[in-house]
Image (spheres, coloured by chain):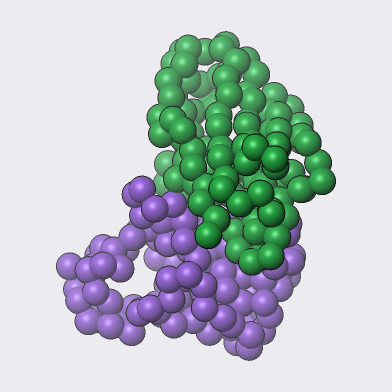
Chain colours: A purple, B green
Amino acid sequence: EAQVTQNPRYLITVTGKKLTVTCSQNMNHEYMSWYRQDPGLGLRQIYYSMNVEVTDKGDVPEGYKVSRKEKRNFPLILESPSPNQTSLYFCASSLSPEGRQPQHFGDGTRLSIL
Amino acid sequence: KQEVTQIPAALSVPEGENLVLNCSFTDSAIYNLQWFRQDPGKGLTSLLLIQSSQREQTSGRLNASLDKSSGRSTLYIAASQPGDSATYLCAALGGATNKLIFGTGTLLAVQP
């Protein structure tokens, strides 16, 4: 089954404690991205990757890092999380760059930073 | 700067009713317009994608239209069912910016 898998689904942690949210897709997609969803603001792109070892900033990259060492994986790293990063996060993948073709989304990761 | 607006934020209808969800965008220079469905605790599922050269797309009971000149798209749902209850989001892909801008969604409740 074609899918995008995110882990963990839920996480409560404290300010400053490094965390990683993993994302994996099994569709051999080249394009992957991370979004955060906040009430009243819609989805905003954090980072995206056009292919292995190729990443770039989205609209709200501050406080986040990503890496793309393998085609299937695109982890999101919060080196020193802060409360304003409390949000619902989605990973997505597609065959071609953002929006050109329908994207497949993971089920989301709800992060709470205390 | 592209802005995408969805009104109303929430809508409740009785089962069987036909309904229309609205999406407005400020910059008509779009590459495509997409509609997604989001269920609680789930990610977004792509429903329909309308290229800028198209006027509408249909999938089953869903029909999406696009009017670039007026900056509007509508999602028509025929014979609504309780299983259609979800949040519906639209997103416009900028032709020059290549950025996908999402609306904040319409929460639809179909009452049995």
Q: Position of residue B91 (x, y in %)?
A: 58, 49
User: What's the residue at 82%, 46% (across, down)?
Assistant: B53
The residue lying toward the viewer, choosing from B78 and A21, is B78
The answer to whether A105 appears left or right of A2 in the picture is left
Q: Position of residue B28 (x, y in %)?
A: 66, 49
A105 vs A55, nearest the viewer? A55
A63 w.r.t. A59: above or below: below
In the image, residue B41 sits, relative to residue B82, either above or below, namely below
Q: Quadrant of residue A26?
A: bottom right
Question: Where in the figure is residue A90, as x and y percent of width and height?
Answer: 48, 60
Left or right side of A2 for B44: left
x and y percent of residue B29 in the render? 69, 54
Which residue is located at x 64 percent, y 74 percent?
A72
Q: Is residue B80 visible?
A: yes
Q: Relative to B87, say whether A1 is above or below.
A: below
How many numbered discs sit on the rendered protein?
0
| Residue at 24% over, 74% down | A82
User: In this view of the protein, which residue sits in the foreground, B29 or B20?
Assistant: B29
Q: Residue at x 55, y 29 (%)?
A: B21
